[in-house]
Image (tube, rainbow, N blue to C red):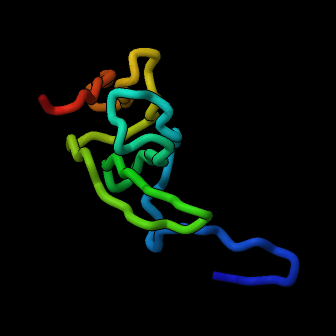
Amino acid sequence: MMEYDGMEQPILFWNPSIAPCGIDFYDGDRFPLWKNHLFVTALSFQQLRRVHIVDGRVIHQEIIYEPGSRFRDVETGPDGLIYVALEEPGRIVRLSPAE
């Protein structure tokens, strides 16, 4: 990674690139332990990742969903659930807490 004076470095990057596509900070209430965590979709790795960031530092990162399809987007729905857009076949998947 190149560094130059006056240039702020990223707090997280992937090498090789996961080809991030959709990104969302979770602001719902259905997954209280994930409040304000970052969700990142990976096109080339076909994953949904959860990234826990505290004070500008990555504390934890995990893969939470690997459906075998490319991800296009991730969003927190008004119902507090997490929705992801997948292709091949095109579909929207709703993630809900385990009971």
Residue at the left extreme of this rendering = 99
Depth check: give the residue in front, 79 or 2.
79
Choose top left, top right, bottom left or bottom right for residue 45: bottom left
Horizontal side, residue 2 vs residue 64: left or right: right
Q: Is residue 41 visible?
A: yes
Q: What residue do we see at 44% from left, 57% from top?
A: 52
Q: What residue do we see at 40% from left, 50% from top?
A: 42
Horizontal side, residue 56 vs residue 70: left or right: right
Residue 87 vs 34, above or below: the answer is above
Residue 30 in picture, x, y percent from top left: 33, 28
Picture mark count: 0
Residue 69 vs 4, above or below: the answer is above
Residue at the right extreme of this rendering = 6
Residue 17 in picture, x, y percent from top left: 47, 65
Q: Is residue 22 visible?
A: no
Q: What residue do we see at 46% from left, 47% from top?
A: 37
Residue at the top extreme of this rendering = 79
Depth check: give the residue in front, 43 or 5.
5
Residue 14 vs 89, above or below: the answer is below
Choose top left, top right, bottom left or bottom right for residue 99: top left
Depth check: give the residue in front, 1 or 76.
76
Residue 25 vs 84, above or below: the answer is below
Residue 57 in picture, x, y percent from top left: 55, 68
Horizontal side, residue 4 vs residue 48: left or right: right
Horizontal side, residue 98 vs residue 58: left or right: left
Residue 1 in picture, x, y percent from top left: 63, 81
Q: What residue do we see at 64% from left, 68% from top?
A: 10
